[in-house]
Image (spheres, rainbow, N blue to C red):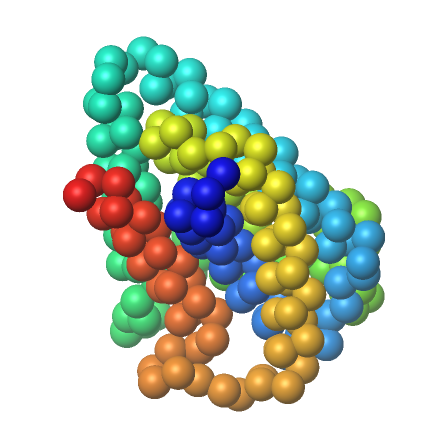
Amino acid sequence: MTITSWIPVLLLALSSSIDNFGVGVSYGIRGIHVSFWGNFIISIIAFLFSELGIIFGQYISNVFPGAMSNVIGALFLFVIGLRIVLLAIPRKKKVNSKKQVVNESSSNSVTGYLSSPEKADFDQSGDIGFLESIVLGIAVSMNALTNGVGAGLIGLSPLAISISAGIFSFLAIGSGVALGKKVANVRIGSWTIGQFSTILSGVILVLIALRNLI
């Protein structure tokens, strides 16, 4: 692979791992410890989810002729990126009982751990154990799965994407925890670091999509 071909691979892996960074920051702020092996388990799950997504994306690309699969993959990444940006923009909160019930039920789902990462610490021990790492790994690797589908459609290297996703996941959580211990109250404008990093994730996907469409 040339240096130029590595750019979308690394950007896609970065986008897949930015949620991991936000989770790491949240844990660092709360003093929750993620061990080396716990982080390693999460990175393995990111690798597997990315690989599954790419395999599915390649299967779909075989169904569509010529450059159509590349266009579909780029549009897929564009829609995902735009959705991430729109959902991450802070909105005024309206408090009502019905919405609270919905929020409580969603926070108990796997993806609910992204908005409240501390919930993955089931025993409230301040340390993310083996089973907790698996649940958290599944939650933060959903981006790797969907991004993998797009990568498979636009023809990026499966092994390069999957390995990069795993490595970036490991580095993102580790650096996020370390940073979170130091920047508990830091904000970027009206956004928290977690919100800003999520928006950046969406912007990266949109840029990758536009690069493949132009």
When the figure is inspected, residue 78 is found, relative to residue 53, above or below; the finding is below
Q: Is residue 214 above or below residue 52?
A: below
Q: Quadrant of the C terminus?
A: top left
Identify which residue, 122 or 88, lies in the foreground. Answer: 88
Would you say residue 33 is visible in this rendering?
Answer: yes
The reply, left or right, for residue 115 in relation to residue 210 is right
> In the rendered view, would you say 26 is above or below 112?
below
From this viewpoint, which residue is outermost toward the front? 2
x and y percentages locating residue 31 in the rendered image: 72, 76
Of the pair 213 and 34, the residue shown nearer to us? 213
Residue at x 62% of width, y 78% of height: 180
Number of labelled discs? Answer: 0
At x 64% / y 51%, what residue is drawn?
Answer: 167
Rendered view: 181 above or below 57: below
Residue 190, given in percent of the width and then of the height, sits at 34, 82
Location of residue 57 (image quadrant): top left
Q: Say whether residue 132 is visible.
A: no
Task: Please identify the quarter of the rendering in which residue 110 is found.
Answer: top right
Q: Residue 207's x, y, as percent?
A: 28, 53
Task: State the residue at coordinates (26%, 47%).
Answer: 211
Instruction: Describe residue 2's horizontal placement relative to residue 118 as left or right.
Output: left
Q: Position of residue 23 (x, y in %)?
A: 58, 63
Camera-nearest residue between 144 and 92: 144
Report which quarter residue 147 is drawn in. Answer: top left
Write the residue at 62% across / 41% down. Answer: 163
**Could you tell whether 72 is left or right of 153 in the image?**
left
Residue at far left of view: 214
